[in-house]
Image (cartoon, rainbow, N blue to C red):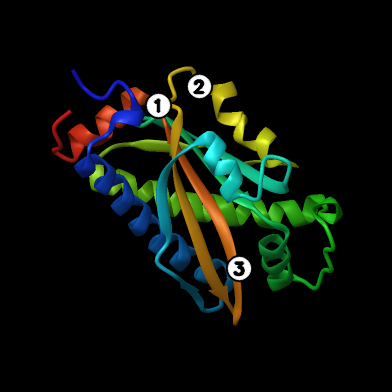
């Protein structure tokens, strides 16, 4: 019969999603270090299966202003990865490439965004490649699309693009240390229900 509701996953299935998050985070940190040409350390990420409403609270509330970047997944696995970046992370990332003072996200220019998009493209690819290797599947990703808006509006983007999403998402709360500065970023994996079944079947889990 398969998984018909992401809200009803069993402990083993949740454990697999958590392990994917852990492996993806490690690979993303390595990719980020290569991009920045500096040492990047990452704490063990906090990974949760959360309601959309709870995700907004983890991100400072629905009215909090943030930079969201979406990458669509297609192929054997369909869904979206959404990375939510606060000003501190964006400022640190941009200043690694060139000196730039950013007092708010409204100060970010097109050149700044190109730096952030490149980072998201690389780190998201690290996550997706991890999933593809673990499951022996083909997953294509689109170039990142950026959106500077409230957290509530950013989190509404996936439901505008997919019709069979569950009410919960895999929330990966990452904390990096880049050149001595501790910053955080949030990665959110949203899969269509049918793709969740493909994932578990490829991993040999009962569905």
The numbered mark, 2 or 1, whose residue comes first in the sequence reads 2
Q: Are marks 2 and 1 in contact (CB under 8 Å)?
A: yes
Number of other residues with Cα within 10 Å of mark 1, as a class: few under 14, some 14 to 19, many 20 or more = some
The residue that disc 3 covers is 183
Which residue is drawn at the image coordinates 60% and 35% (left, top)? 155
State the residue in front, 162 or 152. 152
Q: CA distance from mark 3 to mark 1?
A: 30 Å
Quadrant position of residue 190? top left
Q: SS class of the residue under badge 1? A: loop
Can you give x and y, in whole percent of width and height, for residue 65 in the image? 75, 47
The numbered mark, 3 or 1, whose residue comes first in the sequence reads 3
Which residue is drawn at the image coordinates 32% and 36% (left, top)? 138
Q: Quadrant of the N terminus?
A: top left
In the image, taking residue 104 as reference, residue 145 lies left or right, namely left
In the displayed structure, 1 sits above or below 38; it is: above
In the image, taking residue 111 as reference, residue 52 lies left or right, namely left
The residue that disc 2 covers is 162
Nearer mark to the viewer, of 2 and 3: 3
Q: CA distance from mark 2 to mark 3?
A: 31 Å
Q: Quadrant of the C terminus?
A: top left
Can you give x and y, in whole percent of width and height, for residue 187 in the image? 51, 49
Which residue is drawn at the image coordinates 22% and 35% (left, top)? 200
In the displayed structure, 4 sits above or below 110; it is: above
Can you give x and y, in whole percent of width and height, for residue 92 in the image? 69, 69
In the image, taking residue 18 as reference, residue 159 lies left or right, namely right
State the residue in front, 192 or 8. 8
The residue that disc 1 covers is 192
Which residue is drawn at the image coordinates 76% and 57% (left, top)? 112
Whether residue 76 is visible to the viewer of this picture, yes or no, is: no
Report the number of numbered marks.
3
């Amino acid at each position: 019969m398969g998984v018909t509701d992401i809200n009803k996953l069993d402990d083993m299935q949740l454990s697999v999603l958590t392990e994917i998050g852990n492996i993806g985070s490690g690979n993303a940190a390595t990719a980020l270090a290569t991009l920045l040409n500096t040492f990047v350390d990452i704490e063990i990420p906090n990974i949760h299966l959360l309601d959309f409403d709870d995700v907004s609270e983890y991100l400072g509330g629905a009215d909090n202003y943030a930079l969201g970047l979406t990458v669509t997944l297609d192929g054997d696995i369909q869904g979206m990865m959404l990375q939510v970046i606060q000003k501190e992370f964006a400022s640190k990332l941009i200043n690694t490439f060139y000196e730039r003072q950013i007092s708010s996200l409204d100060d970010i220019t097109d050149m700044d965004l190109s730096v952030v998009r490149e980072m998201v493209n690389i780190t998201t690819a690290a996550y997706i490649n991890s999933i593809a290797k673990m499951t022996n599947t083909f997953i294509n990703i689109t170039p990142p699309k950026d959106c500077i808006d409230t957290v509530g509006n950013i989190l509404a983007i996936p439901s505008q693009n997919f019709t069979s999403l569950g009410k919960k998402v895999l929330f990966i709360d990452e904390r990096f240390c880049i050149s001595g500065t501790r910053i955080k970023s949030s990665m959110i994996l949203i899969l269509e229900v049918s793709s969740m079944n493909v994932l578990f079947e490829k991993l040999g889990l009962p569905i």
